[in-house]
Image (spheres, rainbow, N blue to C red):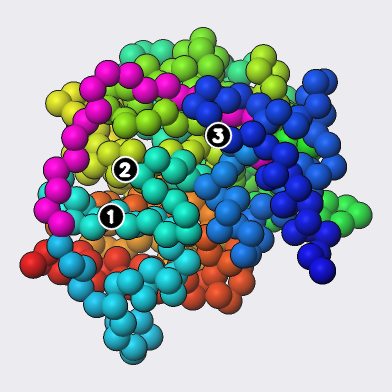
Amino acid sequence: MASPIRASLALALALAAPCVSAQTAPPHVMPDGSVPPALAAARMHMLEAPENMLTFHNMDQLFQTRVVARSGPVAPLARADAALPPATIRGKVMSEDTWEDLTFTSALLVMRDGKVLHESYRNNTDADTHFISFSMAKTFTSMLVGIAVGQSAIRSIDDPAVAYVPELKGSGYDGVTIRQLLQMRSGVDYEERYDFGATPSVAAQIFLNAIVANKERFADMAPRLKRKFAPGSRFNYSTLDTAVLGWVLERATKRPLADFMAQYLWQPMGAQAHGFWIADGGPGVGRELNGMGYNATLRDFARFGAMMLDKGRFNGRQIVPAAWVEQATAMTNNADPAAPPPPPSVTNPMARAGYGFQIWRLDDTGAYTALGLQGQFIYVHPATRTVIVKLSFFPEMGSAKGNDALEDTLAYFSTLTQWNGQ
């Protein structure tokens, strides 16, 4: 017999209508915006294996969304298809195809110097499938901040966030600059720790109330929190910091984040398909979950990576100011012995990493990556002009299998950057 969790997940997906590009709310959300029990259960357990192989590319079946429209000609991706080299994982040599299975891959694209060398799909996905980015969305948020700075909608990243969001006055975010939010050095008393039960942690409360039940907005917790450390003094991975950045963007540009992104990033980039943000409530109420909720096709994630590689230039246009990309990818070492450890989703190699403006440094070769929960990567290796997009369904965060998958993924990324492409 199926478990109650799996049964409720199956029910929620079965009730949902087929994906359509303009969808903003699953039809089984109640007219008043409340979330019925089957859907809430599905959201609560969407990260669990093996169901995540399905949920990670069906988020518009589970959540209300905000569409990021595309328009105009699609930017072509040149091809130079090649057989990828074998992987050596923990002393064992295996084919690239076997490595994809080992590391819970749903889609993979490898580019070298602007040409696609490899593109593959698994688990009933294809070039039209929209995949969840999870925290890769943070890097998208950073690039949107850069665009807003370039337009002078944001005067300076050394402005305090409260200058744009007065609701933060008197909270731990009062006096925190936009730069400190970008670097996750707000000093606010928040931990990316999801402890449920009778006394859930702050992060768990946000997950339950904003993401699962849509009773409040993700950023609503920010004005309630106090300061723990001096702003700028310590790195502390915080999706709430990114949510506040989204709030700043919304106020600075005087537009919903999805609309701003469509006009100034997605359409200039020549995306092949619309993207969408999952939202924490209905139209006019909820906001885009800009710290974890962007969804796009594999190729469009690759276009974004190619734009990052070329310092904000793609499709014949300077989309993000070059100086911003350089600044965003100039990493600060986060190995502060007094700082809290990274969350379970970024343990092992990420504990050794540096952090820029919502983006991770992986090693001393200059590589950096947008990184999402349970195996989502837009990896950029400037020295070899390599871009790798891997969309995965790792086991639950913090698990031994999940940590192994992360290590095994990065090991093969290193092989690919050393491969001559022949």
User: Looking at the picture, how far across and down is residue 64, in whole percent?
Assistant: 65, 30
- Earlier along the polypeptide chain: callout 1 or callout 2? 1
N-terminal label among 2 and 3: 3
Outermost residue on the right side: it is 198
Q: Nearer the viewer, residue 206 or 357?
A: 206
Quarter occupied by the C terminus: bottom left
Magenta segment boundaries in residue numbering: 62-81
Q: Is residue 262 left or right of residue 32?
A: left
**Residue 289 at what x, y percent from top left?**
59, 34
In the image, residue 134 above or below residue 161: below
Asked if residue 300 is positioned above or below residue 269 in the image, the reply reads below
Provide the residue designation for mark 3.
19
Q: Which residue is mark 2?
A: 299
Discs 1, 2 touching: Cβ within 8 Å: yes
For the residues labelled 2 and 3, the Cα–Cα distance comes to 19 Å
Mark 2 Cα-neighbour bin, 10 Å: few <14, some 14–19, many ≥20 = many
Amino acid type, residue under disc 1 in the picture: Glu
Residue 257 shown in magenta: no
Residue 377 in sight: yes
Q: Are marks 2 and 3 in contact (CB under 8 Å)?
A: no
Q: Quadrant of the N terminus?
A: bottom right
